[in-house]
Amino acid sequence: MKPPGAVLATAALDFDVRALALAPDGKRVAAAGTAVAALDTQTLQRRWQVPGIGTVRTARFAPDSRRIVTFATIDDEHHQVRLLDAADGSVLGALDLATPIIVSGDDPDNPAGSAFGLLLGVAIATAVFRKALDGTSRSLVFSADSKHVAAPGGEFDPADGHRRYPLPGLLEPDGAIVNGPLSLDFSPDSHSVVVGWNRAVQSMKAATGAVVWTHTQKGKIARVWFDADGKVCALCTPSQDVITLDPGTGAVQRTVRLDLAITNPLFFITFPPHTELSADRGQLAVFGATRMTVFDLASGARRFDPIAYQSLTDGPPVRARLSDRGDLVAVNRLPGEPTGIMVARTDSGATVWDSGTAIDDAVFTTAPRRLIVGGDRMVRVHWIGPVRLAPISRLDHGGAVRAVAFAPDGHSVATACADRTARVFDSADGTQLRRFEHEDAVTAISYRPGGALLLTGSADGTARGFDLTDGSEAFRVVHGGSVTAVLTTVDGKRAVSGSADATLRVIDLNTMAVTRTIQLDGAVESLAVSPDSALVAVGATDSTARIYRLATGQRLLTLNHEASVRAVAFSRDGTRLVTAGGKTAIVTTVASGLPQRTITHAGPIHTAAFHPDGDHLLTADATLRITDLRDGTTTLAITHENPIHAAAFRPDGAAVATAGADAAGHLTEFPGGEELFVLPHEGSVDALAFDHSGTRLATAGADGSARVYRWPT
């Protein structure tokens, strides 16, 4: 697996990149400076490039990824907002903004003092204005429905770029400079636009620009936004308050004080801090003159102690970017340095990765998780590391969960537990739908195709079938030892149970009666049925794997290993079988019985499975190895600190899930090898299963819980 910070792709450009914007569909990134270029997010292949006017300071994609808006500085007095077609970079509309800096200080009685005052005034006014402009340039925002775009100077029609109505600009009506950044945001329903500047917050109708209400106060407005509930929020300075306003009236409903402590108080008044919101509007990254941190907006608490860096006057403008999940923040500074790039965790401030390379801007991608950075004539893609996923439902039990299985429609998930129960839960919200009791630990579980029948196997020596429509017991098969495996054929006509009593029982699911008993020479360790429902493969403690014909009980093959055969699996087309015993896995051609490939590990192999393409095979001890069966080469190796107990390919083959004694599940991209997600538990994870769509994954833990995770889109 690649370490955090590994470079995955680099693009050399003929202009310095000062701003980046990621398309919401994740397919393109816009790199902007004296030109604007659209690049593929994974390969950085250039799709188009157009020249700019001046230097672009900020760029934004529309939510539908069809438009890009940019803010460019031509010189200290001239700026331009442009609307581009994201397909080819063509200019749909442009608005020129003139922002002269005028300071009067003429005093005929004191020409020297007057000159000094003029110079000092110009210096201060220029610094204030540039600071305000730096924040204002980031105030480019599209409405959620992509039908409106607001920028300094106006609201535009994204279809053709014409300005519908003006917005408060960079100057006050009396000509005074707005010495705080202009800030804009649209309501979640796209019906309202809120504007914050200097000491006022104003709500306007998005369609017409008509003013709905205006809120004024003594302090400056550093940032305005709509929260997840559609209420208006504003960060005020120097009070350090986040006020929540009623979206209909502008009345103050709530005040939360942030313990900013990120900058000198004098500079805090003069230079309001810049901010970046998390995607869920629950966190706010705040970066001031010399330090930055992240706040929880519900409580106002800092997520970590402020990270210090050198003054804003050194290096490029400070940029902070939050990941889409809000768990990481990227800052184009290193502690105590004027340049660099650092990725830190928002829950602790701990550094995930850093580099001394000078960077102007950065954006996170989602799945796979990457950081795209831009600077002097280049864009790079860095691998950052996996996302720590939170389960959409946690299914608590009274003992270790031994097995999990999704219903064919994915709406429910079944568990087998050491607390003597098998349970069925709603996979979306975790509601328990059914609970079935055994006399000892439940060790195996399986759904019949169609989902109306649940099969269970238990250490009490029984395999049972339960009707999920009414909860009744449909059949019970008694073995002479613990039932270690139970499953149904693909056609749903038969079930097979395997036991420590060295027998297989074949059950007719129409009559719910045992039609055949197959005697083995060792306890059953593993079981698989062929895709055509004709064959069953069984691995046993006598170091053999065998294939039987279900209709007749005829033994077709016996395959010898050096130890108990803990894993058996058919390929998707049913032509090959993998068996794993001890440190060796063997791929056998079913028709001929001849071995095709042998894979050897350093330790005992716990699991084996074919990739959907049939050309790759996963096997695992403490290292998961994916082997190309065409030439025997290792395509991917993933090493855990402890033995891997379970592994499976996602149904589309684009990722592999692993879990074991390291108290977590892991999802890794295939064939690239980037670890995408970590699925936390508090103990060993002994089983996992994807639903048929591959959008959900369930894990079974020794910590007494099963957990369901949704694959992020």
Image: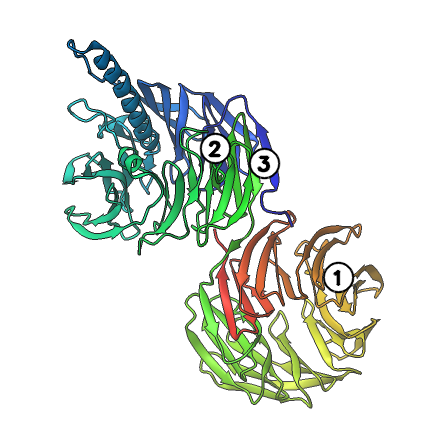
For marks 2 and 1, give the one nearer the viewer.
Answer: 2
- On the image, the x and y values in percent for residue 45 come to 57, 31
- On the image, the x and y values in percent for residue 307 come to 44, 44
Label 2 to label 3: alpha-carbon separation: 30 Å
Q: Give the residue type that dot 1 points to.
A: Thr
- On the image, the x and y values in percent for residue 620 come to 71, 62
Question: Which label belongs to residue 575?
Answer: 1
Label 3 to label 1: alpha-carbon separation: 37 Å
Residue that numbered label 3 is attached to: 43
Question: Which label belongs to residue 338?
Answer: 2
Q: Residues within 10 Å of mark 2 (few under 14, many from 20)?
A: many
| Residue 33 placement: quadrant | top left
Chosen colour scheme: rainbow
314 with respect to 130 (left or right):
right
Q: Give the residue type that dot 3 points to.
A: Thr
Regarding mark 1 in the picture, which secondary structure is present there?
Answer: loop
* Rendered residue at 75%/68% (across/down): 604
Q: Earlier in the sequence, mark 2 or mark 1?
A: 2
* Rendered residue at 60%/36% (across/down): 9
